[in-house]
Amino acid sequence: MKCIRTLLIVFISFIFLLFPLILHAQTPENTTSESPIKYPQFEFKGLFQGRFLAAMTDEVDVLGVQHTTGEVTQTSFDIKRMRVGLTTKISPETEVVILVNLADFKSDPKGKVLENAYAKYTFNKYAALVGGQFRAPFGIEDQVSVDIIKSFDFSNQYYEFGKNGWTSFQIGASVLGSVDIGKVPVNYAFTIINGNGKNQEKDKDNGKQCSTRWVFGLSKENKINLGLNGGIGKVSTQEVFALGADITSNFKLADKLHLELQAEYKQGTNHNLYFSLPVDDRTANVADYQMRGIYFLPNLRYEIAYRRLSSIEFSCRYETFNSSYKIDSNVRQTYTPMVSLEFGKAYTGRIELGFTLDNYEKDIPDTSVYSSNLFLVQLQCRL
């Protein structure tokens, strides 16, 4: 409850400070347009990602699970994502967004399929309200869609922090916007969420998770942005936290050659792991179970513009992640080299080839916590 009271105080104070701006934003402007924009407006979106997978480690299948006995599936075709989305703009200020992933029906769809389901009201550039199920802003990867990232998929830390309610699709509300501090543009977000993932009937307890994200534009020329994240909350009466920092940049090396860089660090309570353990096998304090990780992702992009081929990209993400570095530490290091061919504009078509090279400090037989190598070919088409 302390977390909720704190966020309410911040929220009320913030709205109070922005009230004059909000009133100004609601003042109708005179227009001389002869063809006024009609509402509602609809924008359809879609994404297909199909893959061919080939496991390159003996006794390890294409999902990364090691098998000491039995037959192992080491090659497979797979549909990773088949997304269909609709953004409905009801008025200049209001929009409703829905996004589903039909590929989730290939396994038990409970808690899956529906990804985005939220409404957004924009007062002006300084403030907007979002409510529903959306991607909680807590890092670089929450700000971009998976179809335009510079690797096959999101990082290991992204998915682990998602299991703990900080990233990925969550149910709650957020206040976000942008301001200028001197000559530095700043984007901000204050968020409160249930913290138990998407498509849930209700929160699993009375605790909530509160977080904030700030992004500072340090260089417009090289697109250098510094992001800072922090969050606190309560899960089953236990206090939890998360924090992070990230930086992105884009350097023009030549007329058609760009070097894009990303780096991100996160640390926080792994309460998902803590509550999954039998009571007798864990300590009394959830703070003893903390996760942390960092990744570095350079991407070299050469713009070709030859017929339908727009560009070729070379990237290699290095990531180190530890899901419990204080107790039973087991560091996971992952290398993801990839070559990407872009067709059309904004990744309308994309062919990606590369590897996922996983190395654990300690391998656990008959689990996915096992060192392995995987070859991937991924085809992507998007609207």
Image: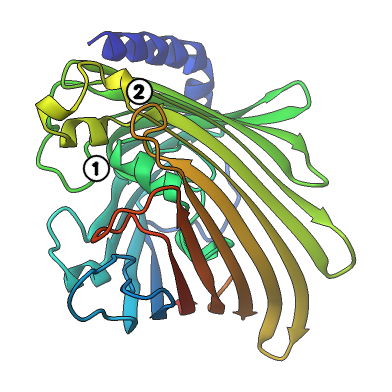
Residue at the spot 32% in from the left edge and 79% down from the top edge: 78
Residue at 46 percent of width and 69 percent of height: 373
Q: Is residue 383 visible?
A: no
Q: Is residue 219 left or right of residue 33?
A: right
Q: Is residue 68 or residue 314 the one in the foreground?
A: 68
User: Residue at the location (32% across, 27% down)?
Assistant: 289
Of residue 286 and residue 148, the one placed in the foreground of this image is 286
| Residue 214 at x, y percent in the picture | 56, 28
Q: Position of residue 188 (x, y in %)?
A: 54, 29
Residue type for callout 1: Gly
- Of all residues, the one furthest to the bottom in this rendering is 307
In the depicted structure, whether residue 88 falls above or below residue 284? below
Instruction: Name the mark on residue 197.
Output: 1
Where is mark 2, residue-wise? 210
Q: How many marks?
A: 2
In the image, residue 94 above or below residue 86: above
The crowding category of the residue bearing disc 1, from other C-alpha atoms within 10 Å (few below 14, some 14 to 19, many at least 20), is many
Left or right, 128 with reference to 258 = left
